[in-house]
Image (cartoon, rainbow, N blue to C red):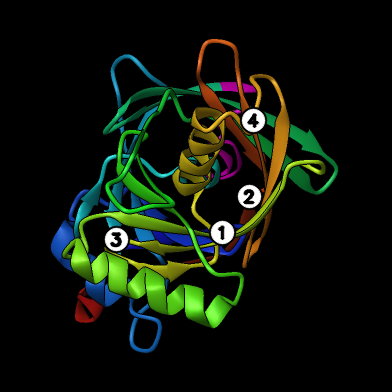
């Protein structure tokens, strides 16, 4: 299997167009001790009405509907490795087609992806909001202490049988429009960043009256900052860098 590894704010992915790769391969390939190591696999497939299709496999082999950071990595891969030299791309995903824009400034790739719309509702527990942004999230006003927040995120995800992404808000600075958070993702565990998770936070802030449409907010994940904007039509846009790590080749012995 010829593969390329990319990361966006530390959220790392294996990208391949190998037709033989299946969800069953993901745990072995994504294992950080005995495999390549990644939060997930992005499968590149042809799409009749888009520039390409991206299929997202979580590290445990489950299929995710969408992945914001993965989508940014996928865009750079298409331009850099597949010769698709376009500023605007349309990518088919499990949650519908997504518009993307690639801006290059020297060695930095500033990639903006449209995460679509989201719907936030208050959860039964105080300080929690359920958000659907094509995949399920639970945004929680957590303790500022990271270790306590991690323990609470684990407890909440266990309570939901691992079938939800949990965003723990460590701090929210409304004046500076800055949020610090950690994310416990379904199928991957704690990750350095989560693109759709950040989108869920943005929708929650709008739902609670904290964020106004058109404002740009910066979300600080353990892997670094990502920029978000909620447009007038309700679409949430994510902007940030995507980084090529290396390319490699495996053989059947690794499966």
Which-is-in-front pick, marks 1 and 4? 4
Which-is-in-front pick, marks 3 and 1? 3
Please tell me whether mark 2 sits on a helix, a strand or a loop. loop
Which-is-in-front pick, marks 2 and 4? 4
Foreground residue among 119 and 97: 119
First in sequence: mark 3 or mark 1?
Answer: 1
Label 4 packing within 10 angstroms: few (<14), some (14-19), many (20+): some
Q: According to the image, label 2 marks what residue?
A: 242
Residue 212 shows up from this direction? yes
Residue lying farthest top?
Answer: 233
Q: According to the image, label 4 marks what residue?
A: 211
Q: Which residues are magenta?
A: 75-88
Answer left or right for 213 relative to 114.
Answer: right
First in sequence: mark 3 or mark 4?
Answer: 3
What residue is shown at x 58% (from left), y 28% (from top)? 209
Foreground residue among 46 and 138: 138
């Amino acid at each position: 299997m010829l593969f390329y590894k990319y990361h966006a704010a530390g959220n790392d992915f294996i990208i391949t167009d190998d037709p033989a790769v299946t969800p069953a391969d993901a745990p072995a390939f994504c294992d950080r001790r005995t495999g390549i190591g990644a939060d997930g696999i992005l499968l590149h497939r042809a799409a009749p009405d888009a520039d390409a299709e991206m299929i997202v496999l979580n590290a445990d082999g489950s299929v995710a509907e969408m992945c914001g950071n993965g989508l940014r990595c996928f865009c750079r891969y298409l331009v850099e490795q597949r010769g698709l030299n376009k500023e605007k791309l349309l990518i088919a995903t499990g949650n519908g087609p997504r518009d993307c824009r690639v801006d290059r400034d020297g060695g930095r790739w500033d990639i903006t992806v449209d995460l679509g719309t989201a719907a936030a509702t208050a959860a039964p527990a105080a300080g929690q909001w359920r958000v659907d942004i094509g995949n399920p999230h639970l945004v929680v006003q957590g303790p500022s202490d990271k270790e306590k927040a991690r323990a609470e995120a684990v407890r909440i995800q266990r309570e939901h049988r691992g079938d939800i992404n949990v965003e723990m808000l460590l701090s929210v600075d409304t004046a500076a429009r800055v949020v610090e958070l950690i994310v416990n993702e379904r199928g991957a565990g704690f990750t350095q960043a989560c693109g759709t998770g950040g989108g869920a936070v943005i929708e929650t802030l709008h739902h609670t009256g904290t964020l106004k449409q058109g404002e740009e907010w910066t979300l600080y994940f353990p892997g670094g900052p990502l920029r978000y904007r909620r447009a007038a039509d309700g679409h949430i846009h994510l902007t940030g860098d995507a980084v090529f790590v290396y390319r490699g080749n495996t053989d059947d012995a690794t499966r």
